[in-house]
Image (cartoon, rainbow, N blue to C red):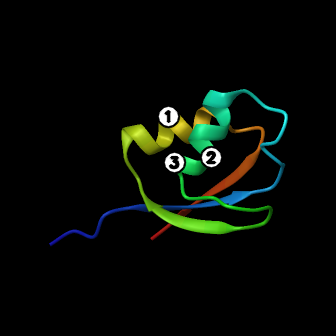
Amino acid sequence: MAEKKRLKVTLVRSPFGRGARHQACVRGLGLRRLHHSVTVEDSAAVRGMVRAVAYMVKCEEVG
């Protein structure tokens, strides 16, 4: 069975002082503090959240 693609997302800028929707996207991705990284499943919903806060996160494909 094919393995699902994953994304490694790292918070590189603070969400404080940003809009509530952008802060919610950061929390929805599971990011808690600066330089915290999470590995999430590559889906359209996750890609949309990453795109909304692209100025605050660094994203790279894993496997």
Using the rendered view, name the quadrant where residue 24 is placed: top right
* Residue receiving disc 2: 26
- For this view, does 36 lie left or right of residue 39? right
Q: Earlier in the sequence, mark 3 or mark 1?
A: 3
- For this view, does 18 lie left or right of residue 2? right
The answer to the question of whether label 2 and label 3 lie on touching residues, with beta carbons closer than 8 A, is yes
Counting from the top left corner in percent of width and height, residue 6 is at 44, 63
- Amino acid type at mark 1: Gly
- For this view, does 38 lie left or right of residue 16? left
Q: CA distance from mark 3 to mark 1?
A: 11 Å
- For this view, does 59 lie left or right of residue 6? right
Q: Nearer the viewer, mark 3 or mark 1?
A: 3
The answer to the question of whether label 2 and label 1 lie on touching residues, with beta carbons closer than 8 A, is no
Q: Nearer the viewer, mark 2 or mark 1?
A: 2
SS class, disc 3: helix
Q: CA distance from mark 2 to mark 1?
A: 12 Å
- Amino acid type at mark 3: Gly
Label 1: few (<14), some (14–19) or many (≥20) C-alpha neighbours in 10 Å: few
* Residue receiving disc 3: 28
Q: Residue at x 83, y 48 (%)?
A: 14
Counting from the top left corner in percent of width and height, residue 39 is at 51, 67
**Vertical position of residue 16 compared to residue 5: above or below:** above
* Residue receiving disc 1: 48
Quarter of the image containing the N terminus?
Answer: bottom left
The mark total stands at 3
**Vertical position of residue 21 compared to residue 46: above or below:** above
Counting from the top left corner in percent of width and height, residue 46 is at 46, 44
Counting from the top left corner in percent of width and height, residue 27 is at 58, 50
Nearest to the observer: residue 30 or residue 60 = 30
Q: Residue at x 38, y 38 (%)?
A: 44
SS class, disc 1: helix
User: Which residue extends farthest left?
Assistant: 1
